[in-house]
Amino acid sequence: MNVVKPNSYRSGPDERGHFGIFGGRFVAETLMPLILDLEKAYTAAKADPAFQAEMNGYLKNYVGRPSPLYFAERLTEHLGGAKIYLKREELNHTGSHKVNNVLGQIMLARRMGKKRIIAETGAGQHGVATATLCARFGLDCVVYMGAVDVERQQPNVIRMEMLGAKVVPVQSGTRTLKDAMNEALRDWVTNVHDTFYCIGTVAGPHPYPTLVRDFQSIIGNETKVQMQEIEGRLPDSLVACIGGGSNAMGLFHPFLDDSTVEIFGVEAAGHGLTQLHAASIAGGRPGVLHGNRTYLLMDADGQIQDAHSISAGLDYPGIGPEHSWLHEIGRVNYLSATDDEALAAFQLLSKLEGIIPALEPAHAIAKVMELAPKRPKDHLMVVNLSGRGDKDVPQVGDILRGKSK
Amino acid sequence: MTTRIDTRFAELKKQGRAAFVTYVMAGDPDPATSLEIVKALSKSGADVIELGIPFTDPMADGPSIQAAGLRALKVGMTLKKTLDLVRGFRKDDNVTPLVLMGYYNPIYIYGVDKFLADAKTAGVDGLIIVDLPPEEDDELCIPALKAGLNFIRLATPTTDDKRLPAVLANTSGFVYYVSIAGITGAAAADANAVGEAVARIKRHTKLPICVGFGIRTPEAARAIAEKADGSVVGTALVDALKNSLDAEGRATGQTVKAVAELTAALAQGVKGAQQAAE
């Protein structure tokens, strides 16, 4: 592809929220004044040392950061190539990386005087993180979740309810993450006066992709410091799974200008790329949905197609706009892993390292199983272990028992 | 550039009455019935017709219009077929203004320049694209104005005086005031609050101001028509259509009639309005 390389991969977006042609603010007029307010509030918060100091306090003592960078010795031995490190985001309070972003947004919501928080969720990890922080700060919380996901992620539904959130099963459309986001936007447009929309990924209208990225960048920033302490240098490659892409962006962004670092994003290939899947970059093209221009799965008429992934958190027909841009300029390599590959990786990591991953990062592990053996033993590979698998145990148990029969 | 919309509002102004603007979804419940419905709208007293472009993810619409879009998509409706429908309508009616309303993605995928050329040829007069605020004017608004189509913008209760000039800058044809913060078919509009909002917008523009969202009955349409230059009714018509369908969601002998009758009743309501002196 003949694309002019920018001086820095980290300077985006422009003032209108564009990463190349991607991003933007494609929202109804009712929401436009709100997202302009949010942008203003975020800019002010970023410049306020007190905001950062308060965040750092909660990140350390409530979330439990920094998360460890752990050398996966047995996985490394088993694969026989690159030295594999796991960034242990699954050890955060609430069990995934989602809490990093939610903490930031809830603190912004408090600064803006908003008392009611809404969120969309797929696997329920973002919903749980949102419900948790709403409980902590005494805010009303409504979580929209596709009815299909409510069924397959019951443990998280129960957790959210225990935390005092109202979980609304969404019956429209395909009844998954995309429809949960539609319904959250409908709520927001109706309750603009008191409601803050806490988006869970690096997508949506500007400034969401940027602020979620910034709140998640703690993952990559810590990794950089930790790898320096352990190995005295930068890693050689990074691998992370991608639905909307927030855990991946959080790990990748601080390394984008380190040209020696190879970066791999792993989309969900579902039943395979020629069948039902959720790999927007591999199988989609640029379109406009949920406030931004990005790669989307759609038909010839521009109708959004059903995504499929075994993992509810990756089951979305789009991807964050900055990922679309990083794909087009060639800085990040986007791969994909099928349901079966993710299941195999889920079991391998559980048995070799005693860590049950969520099905989402199991997709990243699946590609590590391909990439690591082809690399030398002094190659340092970091995988973002973005969530733990407790929520998936019932679902995977059913699948494995069904298969072994 | 003078479109059928401009001509129609000039006529109505002479007659001293507000416009009755109707909305239905293109292709609901099937393309042939949909064409008959659109024809019936203009014959039953609609002054302006808004035709929804079906989309899988209509973020600003309530359950009725979501379902209408899905019914249309299920029978294979597309943007191209929506333009065919407009062409079919224009065979018998070259005066009633017709506005396409929907979301940007189908147009973006069709190709903006090709879409604008095809829409103009088919007989479309204006566009209302919900997810294109003024911040994204370069995408479609400016090209549409150049192509001779009106770009009708939504103003909402959250659009304050500071923001109104930006919202109105490239708006033409009329201004669509969304009477409530919310989705289509939700809460009822309060005529007094609408009156204040219309007066506020009028300080910024000479364009006609039509009001929609939450208007379901002839009485409500009339109350709004006394405060604004037009009343828009969508969900109530879509519901009347839906209630006439058979168990499989197909048109029956009652379908066109049901929409036509409600349209006529609503039109009577609007025509009975006493226009506020300007």
Image (tube, rainbow, N blue to C red):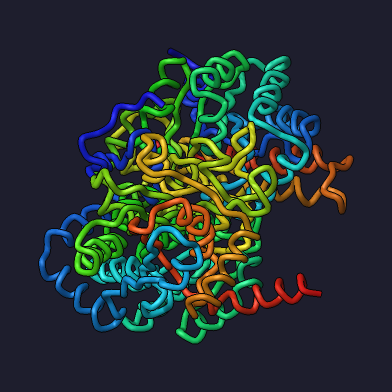
Picture quarter containing residue B233?
top right
| Image side of residue A55 versus residue B151, left or right | left
With respect to residue B155, does A73 lie above or below? below
Query: Could you say which is closer to the camera, residue B101 or residue B19?
Result: B101
Q: Position of residue A89 (x, y in %)?
A: 38, 71
> As drawn, which residue projects farthest toward the bottom?
A162
Q: Position of residue A361 (x, y in %)?
A: 49, 64
Query: Could you say which is closer to the camera, residue B164 or residue A341?
Result: A341
Picture quarter containing residue A384?
bottom left
With respect to residue A27, does A195 lie above or below? below
Q: Quadrant of the N terminus of chain A?
A: top left
Q: Is residue A134 visible?
A: no
Query: Measuring 55% from the left and 39% from the top, which residue is drawn there?
Result: A284
Q: Position of residue B226 (x, y in %)?
A: 48, 43
Q: Is residue A113 visible?
A: yes
Query: Measuring 80% from the left and 37% from the top, which residue is drawn there?
Result: B256
